Image: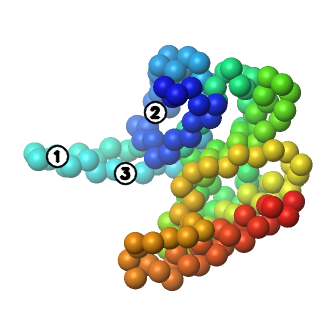
Amino acid sequence: MRKKAAIVMLQEIRIPQGINFRVHRDFRRKYPEYECYIAAGSDIDLVAETSNLFIQQEIVHITVVNFLHKRVFRPEALVVNWHKPRGKKALEHMAHRRVLWLDAMTHEGERISIIKIHQVTARRPDLQRRVNNHIQAEMKRSEGRRRIMGGDLNAATSRTGYSISTKSHFEKVDNQFQEFIKEQEDH
């Protein structure tokens, strides 16, 4: 934020239940040069905070947040519903606060899709594929538009230093990710 980046993407932001509005307001006050977008959803996570004296459990939303710099983007980007309501069950927790898709407009009039994904663990290649398929379907509906996608995709084009026990999981999701990128290059 200090570097005045056009787009800032955050993930694993823990928002205690019931204060989403206050967090959004606090972000706006702290970073007035940015428009702030927090992924919506109704899921909750039980987080245990451990200190030397006790374990405290708190109900929180773990979400993703995007900031768009006002000097680059017009205000009020549209939040895109990247999946159909009937697809929520198949997407499990990924349908809640793990993907934030914005349809933004630059001051020059260019529409850009900005997609932040906090992908599911590499141990769930089936769910990663479902998420990728839903995102690809939405991308096809907006073909020709410029896109910026970022986040923790739990996949890579190359990887070193990981445990042997997770190698097969990573190979599978890495290959899926490479297929996903290849398909996007073809469009």
Which residue is identified by label 3? 46
Labels 1 and 2 touching (C-beta < 8 A): no
State the residue at coordinates (52%, 49%). Answer: 43
State the residue at coordinates (11%, 47%). Answer: 52
In the visual, does 16 lie left or right of 25?
left
Q: Using the numbered discs, state the Cα–Cα distance from disc 1 to disc 3 in whole angstroms.
A: 16 Å
Task: Inspect the image, locate mark 1, and give the three-letter code of the amino acid beneath it.
Answer: Ser
Task: Inspect the image, locate mark 3, and give the three-letter code of the amino acid beneath it.
Answer: Leu
**Disc 3 element:** strand
- Residue 147's x, y, as percent? 76, 46
Picture colour scheme? rainbow
Chain-order first, disc 1 or disc 2: 2
Which residue is identified by label 1? 51
Q: Quadrant of residue 101?
A: top right
- Residue 154's x, y, as percent? 53, 63
**Vertical comparison of 133 with 52: above or below:** below
Chain-order first, disc 2 or disc 3: 2
Which residue is identified by label 2? 18
